[in-house]
Amino acid sequence: MRSSTWAVLAGTAGAAWAVRGRSSAVFGPSVWRGNPRRRAVALTFDDGPSESTPAVLECLARHGARATFFECGQNVVRLPAVAREVLAAGHEIGNHSHTHPGFALRPPAFIHDEFARSQQTIASVTGTAPRLLRAPYGVRWFGFRQMQSRLGLLGVMWTVIGCDWKLGETAIAARVLRHVQPGAIICLHDGRTTESRPDVSPMLAALPSIVSNLSQNGYHLETVSQLLCPTTN
Protein backbone atom coordinates (compact mmCIF):
# COMPACT_ATOMS: atom_id res chain seq x y z
CA MET A 1 0.00 0.00 0.00
CA ARG A 2 2.87 2.33 0.73
CA SER A 3 4.28 2.24 -2.81
CA SER A 4 0.88 2.65 -4.47
CA THR A 5 -0.02 5.57 -2.22
CA TRP A 6 3.28 7.28 -2.87
CA ALA A 7 2.94 6.72 -6.61
CA VAL A 8 -0.24 8.79 -6.55
CA LEU A 9 1.24 11.52 -4.38
CA ALA A 10 4.80 11.78 -5.73
CA GLY A 11 5.59 14.78 -7.87
CA THR A 12 2.38 16.59 -7.03
CA ALA A 13 1.21 19.27 -4.65
CA GLY A 14 -0.64 16.46 -2.92
CA ALA A 15 2.65 15.06 -1.67
CA ALA A 16 3.50 18.25 0.23
CA TRP A 17 -0.02 18.45 1.62
CA ALA A 18 0.05 14.81 2.77
CA VAL A 19 3.31 15.36 4.63
CA ARG A 20 2.74 18.83 6.12
CA GLY A 21 -0.84 19.86 5.43
CA ARG A 22 -2.54 20.85 8.65
CA SER A 23 -5.72 18.95 7.76
CA SER A 24 -3.95 15.90 6.34
CA ALA A 25 -4.55 12.53 7.97
CA VAL A 26 -2.82 10.53 5.22
CA PHE A 27 -0.12 9.25 7.55
CA GLY A 28 -2.24 8.89 10.68
CA PRO A 29 -5.13 10.37 12.70
CA SER A 30 -4.63 14.10 13.16
CA VAL A 31 -6.52 17.24 14.18
CA TRP A 32 -5.83 20.92 13.61
CA ARG A 33 -8.77 22.68 15.27
CA GLY A 34 -11.63 22.18 17.71
CA ASN A 35 -15.31 23.04 17.54
CA PRO A 36 -15.70 26.37 15.66
CA ARG A 37 -18.99 26.97 17.50
CA ARG A 38 -17.29 27.18 20.92
CA ARG A 39 -15.44 30.37 21.85
CA ALA A 40 -12.42 28.47 23.09
CA VAL A 41 -8.84 28.08 21.86
CA ALA A 42 -5.86 25.93 22.78
CA LEU A 43 -2.45 27.49 23.28
CA THR A 44 0.33 25.00 22.54
CA PHE A 45 4.08 25.27 23.08
CA ASP A 46 6.66 23.14 21.27
CA ASP A 47 10.27 22.07 21.92
CA GLY A 48 10.31 22.35 25.71
CA PRO A 49 10.82 22.08 28.50
CA SER A 50 13.45 24.80 28.59
CA GLU A 51 14.79 27.24 31.11
CA SER A 52 12.11 29.68 29.87
CA THR A 53 9.15 27.37 30.48
CA PRO A 54 8.61 28.59 34.08
CA ALA A 55 8.12 32.13 32.74
CA VAL A 56 5.43 30.80 30.39
CA LEU A 57 3.75 29.06 33.31
CA GLU A 58 3.74 32.28 35.34
CA CYS A 59 2.05 34.19 32.53
CA LEU A 60 -0.60 31.51 32.05
CA ALA A 61 -1.25 31.36 35.79
CA ARG A 62 -1.89 35.10 35.97
CA HIS A 63 -4.74 34.70 33.49
CA GLY A 64 -6.07 31.34 34.69
CA ALA A 65 -5.21 29.83 31.31
CA ARG A 66 -4.36 26.23 30.51
CA ALA A 67 -2.17 25.03 27.65
CA THR A 68 -0.58 21.98 26.06
CA PHE A 69 3.20 21.59 25.95
CA PHE A 70 4.60 19.30 23.26
CA GLU A 71 7.87 18.27 24.86
CA CYS A 72 11.00 16.54 23.56
CA GLY A 73 12.15 13.57 25.61
CA GLN A 74 15.77 14.76 25.59
CA ASN A 75 14.70 18.08 27.10
CA VAL A 76 12.65 16.28 29.74
CA VAL A 77 15.76 14.31 30.71
CA ARG A 78 17.67 17.59 31.02
CA LEU A 79 14.97 19.47 32.98
CA PRO A 80 12.77 16.89 34.74
CA ALA A 81 11.61 19.29 37.45
CA VAL A 82 10.31 21.72 34.86
CA ALA A 83 8.37 18.96 33.10
CA ARG A 84 6.76 18.03 36.41
CA GLU A 85 5.99 21.70 37.07
CA VAL A 86 4.02 21.88 33.81
CA LEU A 87 1.69 19.10 34.91
CA ALA A 88 1.48 20.37 38.49
CA ALA A 89 0.21 23.71 37.15
CA GLY A 90 -2.72 21.97 35.44
CA HIS A 91 -1.38 21.87 31.91
CA GLU A 92 -1.07 18.98 29.46
CA ILE A 93 2.06 17.39 28.02
CA GLY A 94 2.21 15.98 24.50
CA ASN A 95 4.94 13.95 22.79
CA HIS A 96 7.19 15.92 20.40
CA SER A 97 9.68 13.08 19.74
CA HIS A 98 12.88 12.44 21.68
CA THR A 99 15.52 14.41 19.74
CA HIS A 100 13.41 16.57 17.38
CA PRO A 101 14.57 15.13 14.02
CA GLY A 102 13.00 15.67 10.64
CA PHE A 103 11.07 12.54 9.72
CA ALA A 104 10.91 12.80 5.91
CA LEU A 105 12.55 9.73 4.31
CA ARG A 106 13.13 8.12 7.71
CA PRO A 107 12.30 4.41 8.14
CA PRO A 108 9.28 3.40 10.26
CA ALA A 109 11.51 1.83 12.93
CA PHE A 110 13.30 5.15 13.47
CA ILE A 111 10.00 7.02 13.73
CA HIS A 112 8.62 4.56 16.27
CA ASP A 113 11.80 4.62 18.36
CA GLU A 114 11.83 8.41 18.57
CA PHE A 115 8.28 8.65 19.89
CA ALA A 116 8.48 5.51 22.03
CA ARG A 117 11.61 6.84 23.79
CA SER A 118 9.97 10.19 24.42
CA GLN A 119 6.76 8.53 25.59
CA GLN A 120 8.65 6.40 28.10
CA THR A 121 10.76 9.33 29.28
CA ILE A 122 7.81 11.65 29.86
CA ALA A 123 5.82 8.93 31.61
CA SER A 124 8.69 7.94 33.91
CA VAL A 125 9.57 11.55 34.83
CA THR A 126 6.04 12.94 35.28
CA GLY A 127 3.99 9.83 36.04
CA THR A 128 1.64 10.59 33.13
CA ALA A 129 1.90 9.20 29.60
CA PRO A 130 0.99 11.61 26.77
CA ARG A 131 -2.08 10.98 24.62
CA LEU A 132 -1.16 13.52 21.94
CA LEU A 133 1.80 14.03 19.63
CA ARG A 134 3.04 16.75 17.36
CA ALA A 135 5.59 15.93 14.67
CA PRO A 136 8.67 18.17 14.61
CA TYR A 137 8.29 20.74 11.82
CA GLY A 138 4.82 19.28 11.23
CA VAL A 139 6.37 16.60 9.00
CA ARG A 140 4.72 13.17 9.01
CA TRP A 141 5.82 10.14 7.02
CA PHE A 142 5.26 6.46 6.34
CA GLY A 143 5.25 4.63 9.66
CA PHE A 144 3.40 7.35 11.57
CA ARG A 145 0.06 5.56 11.44
CA GLN A 146 1.48 2.34 12.84
CA MET A 147 3.46 4.20 15.50
CA GLN A 148 0.41 6.19 16.59
CA SER A 149 -1.66 3.03 16.81
CA ARG A 150 0.95 1.20 18.89
CA LEU A 151 1.51 4.12 21.26
CA GLY A 152 -2.11 5.29 21.40
CA LEU A 153 -1.35 8.83 20.23
CA LEU A 154 -3.45 11.35 18.32
CA GLY A 155 -1.58 13.74 16.03
CA VAL A 156 -2.09 17.48 16.56
CA MET A 157 -1.26 20.16 14.01
CA TRP A 158 -2.33 23.80 14.37
CA THR A 159 -4.74 26.45 13.11
CA VAL A 160 -2.38 29.38 13.73
CA ILE A 161 1.41 29.32 14.05
CA GLY A 162 3.19 32.30 15.57
CA CYS A 163 6.46 31.95 13.59
CA ASP A 164 8.05 32.97 16.87
CA TRP A 165 11.44 31.55 15.92
CA LYS A 166 11.92 34.36 13.37
CA LEU A 167 9.51 37.21 14.16
CA GLY A 168 9.71 39.93 16.79
CA GLU A 169 7.37 40.45 19.73
CA THR A 170 4.87 42.74 17.96
CA ALA A 171 4.70 40.64 14.81
CA ILE A 172 4.17 37.41 16.76
CA ALA A 173 1.23 38.83 18.71
CA ALA A 174 -0.27 40.44 15.61
CA ARG A 175 -0.01 37.23 13.59
CA VAL A 176 -1.71 35.11 16.25
CA LEU A 177 -4.47 37.59 17.05
CA ARG A 178 -5.16 38.33 13.38
CA HIS A 179 -5.75 34.68 12.52
CA VAL A 180 -7.34 33.35 15.71
CA GLN A 181 -10.89 31.99 15.52
CA PRO A 182 -13.14 29.88 17.75
CA GLY A 183 -11.72 26.38 18.07
CA ALA A 184 -8.21 27.43 17.05
CA ILE A 185 -5.09 25.54 18.06
CA ILE A 186 -2.25 28.06 18.40
CA CYS A 187 1.37 26.95 18.02
CA LEU A 188 4.18 28.77 19.84
CA HIS A 189 7.57 27.59 21.13
CA ASP A 190 9.04 27.54 24.64
CA GLY A 191 12.24 25.92 23.33
CA ARG A 192 14.39 25.56 20.21
CA THR A 193 14.65 21.88 19.29
CA THR A 194 16.91 20.41 22.02
CA GLU A 195 19.04 23.49 22.68
CA SER A 196 20.07 24.34 26.22
CA ARG A 197 19.02 27.83 27.32
CA PRO A 198 17.40 28.78 24.00
CA ASP A 199 16.49 32.39 23.29
CA VAL A 200 12.69 32.52 23.18
CA SER A 201 12.51 36.11 24.41
CA PRO A 202 10.34 37.42 21.52
CA MET A 203 7.68 34.82 22.32
CA LEU A 204 7.87 35.54 26.05
CA ALA A 205 7.43 39.25 25.35
CA ALA A 206 4.45 38.62 23.04
CA LEU A 207 2.69 36.08 25.25
CA PRO A 208 1.11 38.47 27.81
CA SER A 209 -0.49 40.47 25.01
CA ILE A 210 -1.76 37.32 23.28
CA VAL A 211 -3.26 35.81 26.43
CA SER A 212 -4.73 39.12 27.63
CA ASN A 213 -6.34 39.89 24.27
CA LEU A 214 -7.80 36.42 23.92
CA SER A 215 -9.26 36.58 27.43
CA GLN A 216 -10.69 40.08 26.90
CA ASN A 217 -12.35 38.88 23.70
CA GLY A 218 -14.16 36.12 25.53
CA TYR A 219 -12.02 33.14 24.61
CA HIS A 220 -11.53 30.27 27.06
CA LEU A 221 -7.90 29.11 26.98
CA GLU A 222 -7.88 25.32 27.28
CA THR A 223 -5.66 22.31 26.73
CA VAL A 224 -5.99 20.53 23.40
CA SER A 225 -7.80 17.65 25.09
CA GLN A 226 -10.28 20.07 26.67
CA LEU A 227 -10.78 21.80 23.34
CA LEU A 228 -11.53 18.50 21.59
CA CYS A 229 -13.58 17.10 24.46
CA PRO A 230 -15.03 19.93 26.60
CA THR A 231 -15.93 17.61 29.48
CA THR A 232 -12.22 16.84 30.07
CA ASN A 233 -11.04 18.21 33.42
Image (tube, rainbow, N blue to C red):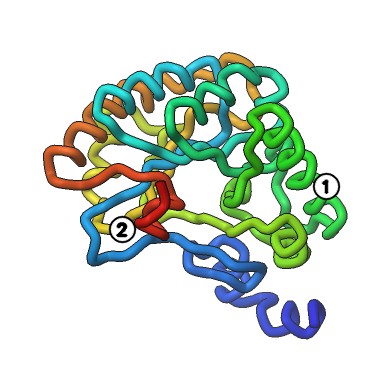
As displayed, is residue 43 above or below residue 47? below
Q: Residue at x 41, y 34 (%)?
A: 164
List x then y, in percent, for residue 39: 21, 55
Could you say which disc has been placed on residue 113 in the image?
Answer: 1
List x then y, in percent, for residue 58: 36, 19
Q: Residue at x 25, y 45 (%)?
A: 220
Gap between marks 1 and 2, in whole Å? 32 Å
As displayed, is residue 110 above or below residue 63? below
Could you say which disc has been placed on residue 71 in the image?
Answer: none
- Residue indicated by mark 2: 183
Q: Amino acid at mark 2?
A: Gly
As displayed, is residue 214 above or below residue 196? below
Q: Are marks 1 and 2 in contact (CB under 8 Å)?
A: no
103 with respect to 221 (left or right):
right
Q: Residue at x 59, y 67 (%)?
A: 29
Q: Amino acid at mark 1?
A: Asp
Q: The N terminus is located in which quarter?
A: bottom right
Q: Nearer the viewer, residue 194 or 230?
A: 230
Q: Dot 1, how many residues are within 10 Å of its Cα: few (below 14), some (14-19), or many (20+)?
A: some
Q: Secondary structure at mark 2?
A: loop
As displayed, is residue 136 above or below residue 18? above
The picture quadrant where one finds residue 72 is top right
Q: Secondary structure at mark 1?
A: helix
Q: Dot 2, how many residues are within 10 Å of its Cα: few (below 14), some (14-19), or many (20+)?
A: many
List x then y, in percent, for residue 148: 70, 60
Q: Earlier in the sequence, mark 1 or mark 2?
A: 1
Q: Nearer the viewer, residue 197 or 152?
A: 152
Q: Nearer the viewer, residue 225 or 20?
A: 225
List x then y, in percent, for residue 184: 33, 55
Q: Nearer the viewer, residue 110 or 91?
A: 91
